[in-house]
Image (cartoon, coloured by chain):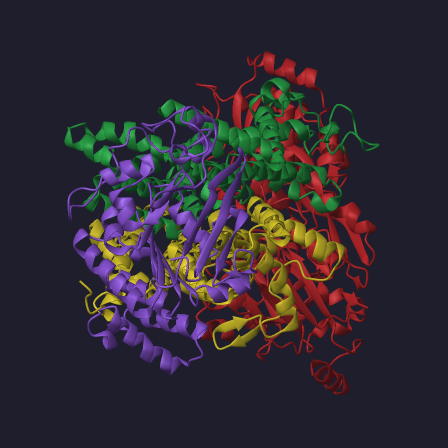
Amino acid sequence: MAAAVQRFLDSDLWWSFRRSPVTVVSAIVALVCILGAVLAPWIAPHNPFDLASLNLSDAFKPPAWDEDGAAEYLLGTDDQGRDVLSAIMYGARVSLLVGLSATIFATVLGVSLGLTAGYAGGHVDSVLMRICDIQLTFPSILVALLVDGVVRAVLPREVHDQIALFVVIFAIGISEWPKFARTVRGSTLVERNKEYVQAARVIGVPSLRIMFSHVLPNVIGPILVVATLNLGLAILSEATLSFLGVGVPPTQPSLGTLIRIGNDFLFSGEWWITIFPGVALIAMVLSVNLLGDWLRDALNPKLR
Amino acid sequence: MSNVAPLLQVKNLRVEFPTRRGTLVALDDVSFDIAPGEVLGVVGESGAGKSMTGAAIIGLLEPPGRIAKGEILLGGRRIDNLRYEEMRRIRGKEIGAIFQDPLTTLNPLYTVGRQLAETMTTHLPIGPGEARKRAIEWLEMVGIPAAAQRIDSYPHEFSGGMRQRVVIALALCAEPRLIVADEPTTALDVSIQAQVIALLKRLAREKGTAMMLVTHDMGVIAETADRVAVMYAGRVAEIGPVREVVKHANHPYSAGLMASIPPLDRRVERLAQIDGAMPRLSAIPKGCAYNPRCPQVFDKCRTYRPDLINAGTTQAACWLYDTEAPRG
Amino acid sequence: MRKLLLAAALALGLGAGWAEARTVRWAASGDPNTMDPHSQNVGTVTMVLQQIYDTLIARDQELGLAPGLATRWEQVEPTRWRFWLRDGVKFHEGQAFTADDVVFSVTRAQQPTSNYAIYVDTIERSVQVEPLVVDVITRVPDPILPNKIASLMIMSRSWSEAHNSTRPQNTRNREEMYTTRNTNGTGAFRLQSREPDVRTVMVRNTDWWGWNEPSSREANVTEIIYRPISSDATRIAALLSGEVDFVLDPPLQDLNRLRAAPNIKVVEGPEVRTIFLAMDVHRDELLYSDVRGRNPLKDLRVRQALYQAIDIQAIHRTTMRGQSVVTGTFFPPQVNGYSREEDVRLPYDQARARALLAEAGYPNGFEITLDCPNNRYINDEQICQAIVAMWARVGVRARLNAMPLAPFFAKIQRDDTSIYLLGWGVPTLDALYSFQSLLRSRDGGQGNGIWNYGRYSNPRMDQLIEIMTNQSGAPRDAAIREALRIYREDIPHIPLHHQMIPWAMRSNLTIPHMANNQPYFRWARMN
Amino acid sequence: MFAFIISRILQAVPVMLTVALISFAMFAYVGDPVAIMLGQDFTEAQRDQLVRDLGLDQPFWVQFATFIGHAAQGEFGLSYRLSRPVAELIAERAPATLELAFTAAALALLIGVPMGVYTGLYRHSWLSRFFLTFSLIGVSLPTFLIGILLILVFAVWLGWLPSFGRGDTVNLGWWTTGFLTVSGLKALVLPAITLGLFQLTLIMRLVRAEMMEVLRTDYIKFARARGLPNRVVHFGHALKNTLVPVITIVGLQLGAIIAFAIVTETVFQWPGMGLLFIQSVGAADIPVMSAYLMLIALVFVTINLIVDLLYYAVDPRLRIGRGKGGH
């Protein structure tokens, strides 16, 4: 029965997916971004991290279609002679890695705490939700900035640089878990009072099993929606932190880092160094957001 | 009954929901009349189309639902094709509505007095002072104690039963000729249901208001209605005087339904006695919609759809009463 | 209103050569962190304070010495310099300028909290001879005292005492005193208002003694509004859109665009500042390297390899966009003691670099961390990035540690570094200043090796520096020549280039370009 | 009402204490004030004296209490970087940030709420689709990129508006305002748009979702069934019910605006608290950072309190105790 419902849901999703050209386009864009990022080490034309391959005399090459451009560097090169296209692919990799990891971290944390709060109720619930409320009043970017700042200040610089990526993931993840907790808690409360859960309780099914086998499957839809929309936000948060110079370490430049570096060249005519990473970032976030929007509408037909 | 001009006429009403998998027919060929002052009970299982019929009459079908065929006439005037603004003037003024759940029907942010007054000033040529005075009277009429004080209370300050009384007052306050009451007691405590029904019945009689009472509670119907329409899968299965339908139902479905009424004053749960379940709108069988469950099914039922046919004291949509065709 | 007042002032004969309000809106990346003239010896502070405070000896437009508050000076004895002071000079708040103010200012600059000790290190005391004659007595003969005294800004004794400011503000322990935000100089402009990090407004001191000097006769600036704009892009956008008139430090990558823009001109010139890499040649094991038990940088061959691995022409061409003067030594020709023959680089030769590394026992290179500021010198971080890439090609795996100047200086000043990039300016325009600060052993002598964070120590170098300090004439010149040769052969630093400094401004502003990167608005004219 | 406020304030206390604890930890331990104050040359005796003077030999809780005491009086010591009292620095910068945040918030609200209501009511209209597309782009564009692009177009290419700073300001007592001069107002335009755009789109989308949610409720259907005019149903019944969640959202967004001001102020060199904060982060200026943190926390707690009070005013269900009891 559950499988049949699931199949129905899947086909339904598929149907609404195919009906919306915007969604199809954004899925393709997202797929291109993800593939480009994931496969960067194999398909990028150059390796921007291989310092020995950089040549300063190749610096500031415009895109290939410009008369001064070189076919070797499709989107031009930056001030160190790095291939912009390759840098974008590797940068997208970092952006995506941070965004995904932070979202997964926030999801796991938020879902477990939300389930616990919704299922346990009482003091556990009120304390957890109070924490949620407090944190939700602080914008996530500020929380991330503070977490990052404190870790930066506490750890010696060398140690920090090595784990900087994790710090950023942690900072962004910790700033976003309450949204998940809230969503899950709400759904859990609804599910908890349904007859089948009550019945399961009465016959002595362990709480943990009830939560994971009965409650969780019913809240997967909303979680998926929140997670998708949050992925876009997480990528933006990372870009913003990196733009402010407190995000990922410069040895692993993300799209935000590339934009920050390129910004210095925006007015001097070398626009490609900043515009292309900017376009890549927007394309990635916009496509993810569009997918999230579609998913929300598709899973929540009432809203249509 | 046919000697009095009917107040409401529903003729061959068809309501469709266009969906991505094709068009769902929610109501098909529904016809009935309500005379002035008459109470028509509409019964049937959930999803049979009872509430949909009510919504179609007050012109508030949920989009994308739409009337695809048929007519609705109020006092001889066609109202199903009116523009929104014209229909709005009729709602509340000519046709009042009562919804199922009094807990969600009232706007939580406005006092009951304000909601009553705004309804009256919208439809009646009275000022705010007069409206307030009448609001208090209405609250008294529906049995709210200390109405003069409670008029400035917010809905959440009332109990469920009291709220439904407020809703009744709201439905009646512009003195409509017809009330569409959609399961007015379902959400209430059993102990309160009878009081609310009694109130509704009394007011309708006093004001001479006709009523379409939608419910799946046969007990309520038996007690309140003059006539009753039994609906099944978006169609009227049988319609006739309440006594006849309850006692001598002609349609096999009605018969099964009536058999489920327990002896006096015991509440009826879902109709578990009929085997199987009502089909989904997307999978209504060919022929008579009831044929897969019908104990008296024969070939014709599986192929052709029956219309309402005179079946003695009632009209039933059943080939059993088709005098022209031989039984198979 | 202001125009009216100025017209009135003109009518009273207070001003000459200017007739109406001429405001220069000036922007640079950093903001001075104090208004105390003896507290912070950094360019961002002096560029504002030298508009307000005068020195005994001024600089002319070629950075030569010129009369300032002293009209004349003379080395009356080997250890005694005498200064004859200008008559009738008044501080902005009205106090008359006397020899006593000079004595006070010298003493103040010698306080432990002073950052200007290097300019007064040889001074034993100063005495008032007459109200307008002052003697400065040195512990040892100091031939370049006038060069140093030219950087010492003169304060009013009575004003300082009245405001509890008889010693320089101690920026290290974060104290605030009156001089943090207030000034009282004798200079061409006086401070009108100051909001740190936002704006500093100076207005013309119509009483200034120098307005009738030939160099200032055409000057007409009546108001200077300084705003720090740290973002390169924003600073340039502000100049292009006409919100500022003068940008002291336009980013190199924008120069072509600025040159092409109407109503904007770029004035270029060399700066007396040399960029180089300095190395830890003291520790037996580097703090930031994978080499254990020995310090590769102590090996001349390794230093030479790192040197020859750098393609300085590529950096000059691309990173600096031609705005640098490649060098093989550590101060530019404007500085007394410079020698063309000693300004020779080791050639760029990666094969040679690899061979040297192999010879030194590092055929596979080694790891090291390069500390680099990212907002102090022109394109500092980019230079370091380029060098890291170049080193990578000879097998030296350098990790770049780029930071803002505050943590950067804090780090290297703890000797907490293995190799770092530094830029060194020479305000005295004499070689000694560089030798003493950068290469002398840190032996506790005042000013000795205070910027020698690699702790280079060479007894012969120390001797030569001693000669430079105490002697003049031919022996001194010879000592400098020899020291420069040792510098070239011993490679305590890897020299890179002298900075060129472009100034960008609106076409209607004329201001002499100065190699010390200080704009002198007393010589500026707005049309 | 009074009890309600008191209970809300009591709930805010632990928040402030937690933030204060983080602040204090940064202040006391991260910066190592002794090392910074002593510089390079010191004796053990000097060091011990300084530790005593700073009260660092006291137990943790005593130090913390002292810190809170000082903080409550706005006493955060001197900035490492600027050698000036932190409270004074922040007081100087606060007007710039508050004026910017206020303008951005007003922009976001005055445009975002009507757009949200419109798109919620007329979901399928052409204009709604346009607004929605615009809003999606709005939430997907990072603030700094918007700022950079606006500067490029309006300051550099067109030369219409200034690209940095606050323009001329007028002093009103200790408050400096840019609202009273033409150049001040011009300088405000681009930063305010940059800062407000993201919030505008967010508010619009949230109002739209709320509106759609409310429009599906029974009481709206019932209001229609009572024949109330659309105007009354939409802007009376529906909008008022939308208001409750919208107030929360707007409260949160106001906080977000102050936080995102850090980015905007960096891009536009707007001399506010955010720029001060980022500059302090660069210079490891711990006193400024911890004071900023406390101040932001205070702002948020205050906003929350105001939000709760507005809730209280709008939603009668919260006014418990007044009801005469219907049961």
Percent coordinates x, y for residue C426 in the rendering: 65, 48
Q: Is residue B309 visible?
A: yes
Q: Is residue D54 left or right of residue A262?
A: left
The chain in purple:
B
Q: Where D214 sits versus C346, above or below?
A: below
Q: Does any portion of residue A252 appear in the rendered image?
A: no
In the image: residue A16, left or right of residue A79: left
| Viewer-proximal residue among B68 and A10 | B68
Q: Is residue C152 above or below residue B46?
A: below
Q: Is residue B116 left or right of residue C446?
A: left
Nearest the eye: B57 or C249: B57
The residue shown at (58%, 53%) is C42
Of the chain colours in the picture, the one used for chain D is yellow
Q: Please identify which colour was used for chain A in the image.
A: green
Along the viewing direction, whichever of D191 and C525 lies nearer the viewer: D191
**Residue D236, image x, y percentages:** 45, 66
Q: Residue at 40%, 73% (x, y): give it.
A: B120
Residue at the image position 56 percent from the left and 68 percent from the top: C194
Q: Quadrant of the N terminus of chain C?
A: bottom right
Tell me which corner region of the image, top left, top right, bottom left or bottom right, holds residue B160: bottom left
Where is residue C167? Give x, y as percent: 46, 63
Q: Colour of chain C?
A: red
Q: Nearer the viewer, residue C363 or D82?
A: D82
